[in-house]
Image (cartoon, coloured by chain):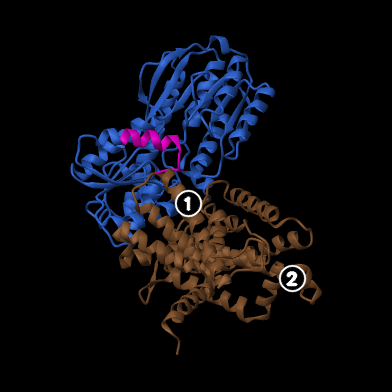
Amino acid sequence: MASDKDRFVYTRRQALRLGAAALGITAAARIFPAFAADAISSATISTAGETVSGGKYKKKGPYRIGFSNGFSGNTWRTECLASIKKEAGQQKDLADLIIVDGQGDITKQVNDIESLISQNVDAILCIANSGSAVAPVLRDATKQGIVTVPFNLPVDGEAWTAYIGTDPEKKGFALGKWLREAVGESAKIVALGGLPGNSYTASAWAGAKKALDGSNIQVLAFKDASWEEDKAKVVMADLIAAYPDIDGVWCDGSQDGAGAMKALLAAKKPLVPVTGDDYNGLLKLYMEQAANYPKFKIGLLSEPTWESVVALRTALKFLHGEDAPKKQIIEPKLITAENYKSYVRPDLPDGVFVDSDLSDDELKQLFKA
Amino acid sequence: MTTGAESLPTHFARILALVNRMGAVWIAVIALYVVSGLVSPGMFHVDQVLNILQVSAFLGVVATGQTLALLVGGIDVSVAGVVTMSNIVSTSVMVGHSETMLSGIAICLLIAAVVGLINGWMITILRVTPLVATLAMNSILFGAALVYTGGAPHGTVSPGFLVFGQGHLIGLPVSTLCWLAIALAMVWLTQKTVFGRRLYAVGANPVAARLVGIAVRRTVTAAYILSSIMAALGGLLLTSYIGSPSLGIGDQFLLTSIAAVVVGGTALNGGVGSIFATIGGTLFITELNSFTNIVSVSTGTQFVLQGAIIALSVLLYRLIGAKRAVS
């Protein structure tokens, strides 16, 4: 067992090292073809939209960069913050990274960004609480010559310098396609989403429905489970009562997937194919239970926490006068039974998102594990 | 001997009297259950009944404490923060070991008691409005959980602790049995003890209560301490149900705990209500969630349905109560 575990850790470290090197290459590149190289870990970055010229943003360092984080308080954001702080420490011409927290409040985030503008920062990074609410203030900042890089969640229009993130519809489609193959053409599935009304789940589910089109797969229910294990477990327990035969579960986040699988276990039902992201809890559950339930399969696409690193590097590129693409779309590699051992972290808490540029020791320190 | 003409209204009045004594919410609980079972037969399965009872326990324990806060004319919105605190603290103290289980539970209850004491102190000595005082405490607790974990909660519960949230005893979920034990203890406390009568007296009229020699401050503070402790117990049961920490776990109780109590018939301005009715209120809210999970409606429709059914049910049994008062 010990040797197995060591091997997995080594494999993952190796993957990360390769990935980090690859990101270094992409960071140095001036021309942006479709990024064939790995970014960090095993994801790739493709580009969309025109190439934005860095000439007009060119400035002499050292730079001051602001990061308006919509809220903190889940482990994804915690790792994202840890990654950007680590990266900031390694950028010699970055004098100051000012991080402001919107506390989940749309208005506060707009005020936060206004205060960053008044502090004369050179660039503003942002994960928006509302893609429409921050659009005008980012436009103002861009007009004033500040580099603006929203990432992770899209911002309306294109009045910002560049955007970095995954494509939720594409991810939802890929997860739907995987689930379709895993459960067969005439299965019955349920779908669990994130916070009620969030646009990420809406896009991902729209993608998934396209992937399921043309099959006889019956979607018994689509419910929001807030990306919380406890809520997903409660919702799934109700769905199990209403629909005793559920052949698969589509989720856009693995907290939902883990909660759903725990509900099946509590109801003494066999585990079934499930989709999600790189939340360690579901990977650990798969590692523990795969042998007991032959039909239990995972198809996962990460939402990399190192998006913040790419955003910071992109902002610095513009400040150096280099060109960069308008949109960088991160395309994570599908995690399945075949490769999950490179990702699962049995020695770390369930809440860890494993697609991280942080080293094992850094993750352990962050999670006090 | 009564004539047939007299017996019908007499029986009706008796039934109404009985319903009113039990809490009219129980009619709503039964009616909603029958309707949801007709719409989705899955609701009638024994497994689903047990599932609803199991899930009700988390809200039920928190709402039991909330009832005490409302009875003294207050409100405790810090229960959300206390649930999150107990989830984060218990998992980080237990870290999956058996020998740390009791200390994990004890530390949570101790912190909760201190939280309740500070709430009571802010409300009775500093004269801060209960809503504002407990909202501030809720914010402090969430912030403290963020600082304590650095946003990265770790740990897991002791293996033996899982039985409280996931186990079964004599065919019933252990969480339900815990809830009933706590709720019945509080029924006894509020109905059969001097302290219980003081709670009602203070909530109905604090000035009159003080004039007859009741230690109003001490009674109110005790209610908040009990409310906090029960929120921690509810949080511990929920933690046992899921086994791992989550920073957003308590948020759901901020309003649902108040809804369960008010749907049960406890007055928001104090002095009227019962723990027994809160059991009904809790079952009603959980049934409603479960029903709207099962029927094929969108999340938006789910919220509209929940709001409309809560409002309708409160209206309905207020009418029943009024009818009895007239008869």
Q: Which residue is mark 2?
A: B218
The vertical placement of B259 against B271, above or below, is: above
Q: Amino acid at mark 2?
A: Arg
Disc 1 target residue:
B308
Instruction: Tell me the SS state at disc 2.
Output: helix
Q: In the rendered structure, which disc, 2 or 1, sits on the residue that comes first in sequence?
A: 2
Q: Would you say A134 lies left or right of B283 here?
A: right
Q: Residue A345, can we see it?
A: no
Q: What's the residue at 30%, 38% (across, down)?
A: A175
Q: Looking at this view, is A325 or B39 the one in front?
A: B39
Rendered location of residue B231, percent (x, y): 57, 63
Looking at numbered disc 1 in the image, what kind of residue is underneath it? Ala
Which chain's residue wears label 2?
A: B
Q: Is residue A74 magenta?
A: no
Q: Quadrant of residue B114?
A: bottom right
The residue lying toward the viewer, choosing from A154 and A3, is: A154
